[in-house]
Amino acid sequence: MKLRSFILTVFSVCIASSAFAQANILNAKKTEEIGVKTEAQLALDNDKPLEYGYVDDRDILYSKMTWEKIVLDERANFPLYYPVDTNNIGKDRRSLFDVLFKAIKKGELVNIYDDSYFTAKRTLKDIEAAMTKIDTLDIGFDQYNADGFVDPEYIIRRDIQSFDVSAYLIKGLWYFDKRHGELKYRLLGLAPAAPDVNFIDSEDESNKQPIPMFWIFYPEARDILHEAKSFNNKNSAMPVSFDHLLNSRRFNGYMYKEENVYGDREVKDYVADNALMQLLESDRIKDKIRNFEQDMWAY
């Protein structure tokens, strides 16, 4: 019986691996056939993200809302950042920002918010205006003063691209489910963060602090992020969906805010000008949440 189960498991993994790899690459006789999936592969890909289980409010014994920052300079977070240049790479590989922004432009993500409390909505025009800077060179001003017009070559347009996104901000709820007797986490909000477009090329590093461009309610984007795959450096035949990557917390981040009586103030507001102490405070918040679960089983 165990041998039969083992064979079935290996067989299932092999089928899944063939489906997740670059489709038809070993059987293609022409370059046009690469990426064209068979009917069996399309049927296997007809899946959905794993649904969240229902949690009754009465089952939540303890909860704490936290905000975290995922810095993309860290190697563990590279799958969220790369690829930044899509000109010389397949269309099946895109960064998380490209996936989100493309979904917004196509109208697949309708509800875009200005803050992490999801109170004020934003439109695509609002986002594009905040991501674009149009400037005129000095020679353009001279031409305008002399001739009354400016040639397009003297007008510079700067747009925020995926390589400018330096961090992601996430909002989530840690809660203790008394029905299952364990501490769980539910991701609620996600925001790409980049420097202000007006100072993005400045040499002053103090002006390049990442600010959130927009917030999305994460459960609304799960289907989109489930279809988009991030690169798996250990096994390229088994890419990981962005939805699975984020829900399984396969990233490295630190808490920069928790809900508190002081209007949900950030760590930097009461631990100022000391990066080391801010990191220690972030660890203290994390340990406080984790210790609650440990204390539940202390006799």
Image: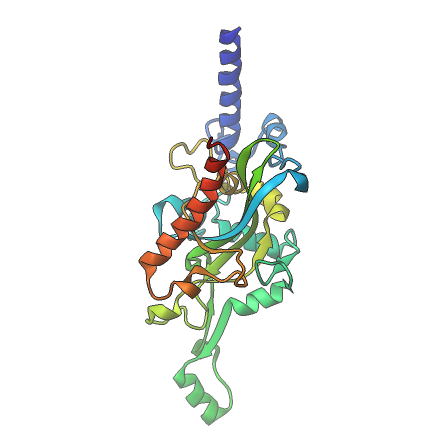
Relative placement, left or right, of 76 versus 149 is: left
- 280 w.r.t. 199: above or below: above
Residue under the point 53% across and 68% down: 130
Residue under the point 49% across and 37% down: 293
Out of 254 and 168, give the one closest to the viewer.
254
Spot the residue most to the front.
299
Q: Quadrant of residue 182?
A: top right
Out of 236 and 137, give the one closest to the viewer.
236
The answer to whether residue 230 shows anywhere in this view is: no
Q: Could you say where residue 125 lies in the image, as x and y percent from the top left?
A: 61, 67
The answer to whether residue 241 shows anywhere in this view is: yes
Out of 53 and 217, give the one closest to the viewer.
53
Out of 85 and 285, give the one closest to the viewer.
285
Relative placement, left or right, of 275 versus 228 is: left
Residue under the point 43% across and 65% down: 269
Q: How many marks?
A: 0
Q: Could you say where residue 170 lies in the image, as x and y percent from the top left?
A: 51, 52
Residue under the point 46% across and 61% down: 266
**Colouring mode (rainbow / by chain / secondary structure / one colour):** rainbow
Spot the residue most to the top.
1
- 137 w.r.t. 116: above or below: below
Q: Could you say where residue 23 lies in the image, as x and y percent from the top left?
A: 51, 32
Q: Could you say where residue 92 lies in the image, as x and y percent from the top left?
A: 50, 42
